[in-house]
Image: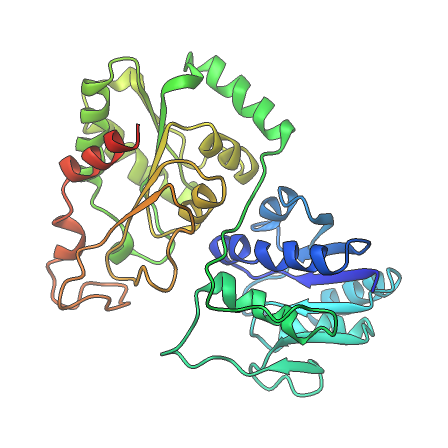
Amino acid sequence: MNRILIIAPNWIGDAVMSQPLLANLKAIYPQSQIDVLASPWVAPIYRVCSEVHQVIEARLEHKQLQWGLRKQLAKQLELNQYTTCFVLPNSLKSALIPWLANIPLRIGYRGEMRFGLINLALDNPSKVNRPPMANHYLALANVLEHSQEIDINKPVDPKLNISPAAKESIGAKLQAASIKEKSIYVLCPGAEYGVTKRWPANHFATLAQQLITSEPDAHVILLGGKGDQALGESIRTQTKNDSQIHNWCGKTSLDEAIALIGMSKSLVSNDSGLMHIGAALKVPQVAIFGSSDPHHTPPLSDKAKVLWLNLACSPCHKRECPLGHLKCLKDILPATVLDVIQMHH
């Protein structure tokens, strides 16, 4: 087996969770070349996986067929003569490209009507017994003939590197903002899913303030996407030490965000893609869970501390609090988070 193609998932957290599968494939087939087809959104994750030979970026939109683009991509991929393809998303359309590209072995979980498109299909585990996502992807390697049977219940930790170019560009940004590298705290207030995954902005602001009070030369950097800019601004303006709190939401590329998290003293986040990046970089971190279940998508790192109140009403997995009080997040106090951060050091 020489050339393997991975069809990447669409979410940053899921992309991080797929790294142990890549590491395993490299262990079984050391001579193989692993390429990843990914959207520009998750491509930076694969650029910092040491197992990946090349990342092929494609603007494949969520929920759109884009038949023309898929056919064109398949033509281009066919020239690479892949022997095997792992299709990580569950959708029908994600299985079209490897089928059109005539890749002989197409491996994935049984998903929406993919009969024939995936020719080595595994049954999807039931919602009740789902293993953690990293193990779910890793189990796909079990179908290969040379694979040592993987115990899918054994914890596996994803591992990412930091790209030297991103480290350099984030270094220049820090210098321009007169931020010294050794006392950076990164707070990630956003979560793609919605408000029931977001620790309140005023709690983030209080924590930022307390960090600077307890460590006068600390700098707090708020990190997130363009959609988190206003949230970051509201946190920054609620604090007194303006010059030490920086709203960088939407101002870094994901490659740079990975590098910045990697050099931070501590990371505080909600259950989000950036949380999984922090875990894969093994930085001390506090992960705050509200409506979601830390048993299914925990940060996989021994340096991560999960704060979850496990209330009778959670995990509810709803985008809005059905009871209207959001206690699962509001009742996790900034002082508690600060204690955990200080215990790490």
Q: Is residue 65 in sight in this rendering? A: no
Q: Position of residue 131 (x, y in %)?
A: 44, 70
Most foreground residue, 189 or 24: 24
Give the vertical position of 224 relative to 214 (above or below): below
Front-most of residues 104 and 77: 104
Total number of numbered discs in the rendering? 0
Quarter of the rendering occupied by the N terminus = bottom right
Left/right placement of residue 202 relative to residue 145 reads left
Tell me the quarter of the picture where residue 93 sits: bottom right
Q: Position of residue 49 (x, y in %)?
A: 63, 45
Residue 256 in the image, given as x and y percentages of width and height: 53, 33
Asked whether 15 or 282 is in front, the reply is: 282
In the foreground, 19 or 232 = 19
Measuring 14% from the left and 63% from the top, which residue is drawn there? 311
Q: Position of residue 67 (x, y in %)?
A: 70, 72
**Rendered image coloring scheme:** rainbow
- Which quarter of the rendering shows the C terminus? top left
Q: Residue at 67% x, 76% y: name it.
A: 143
Q: Is residue 75 above or below residue 13?
A: below
| Above or below for 202 versus 60 | above
Residue lying farthest front? 148
What's the residue at 42%, 47% (across, down)?
Answer: 301
Is there any visible trace of residue 240 in the rendered image? yes
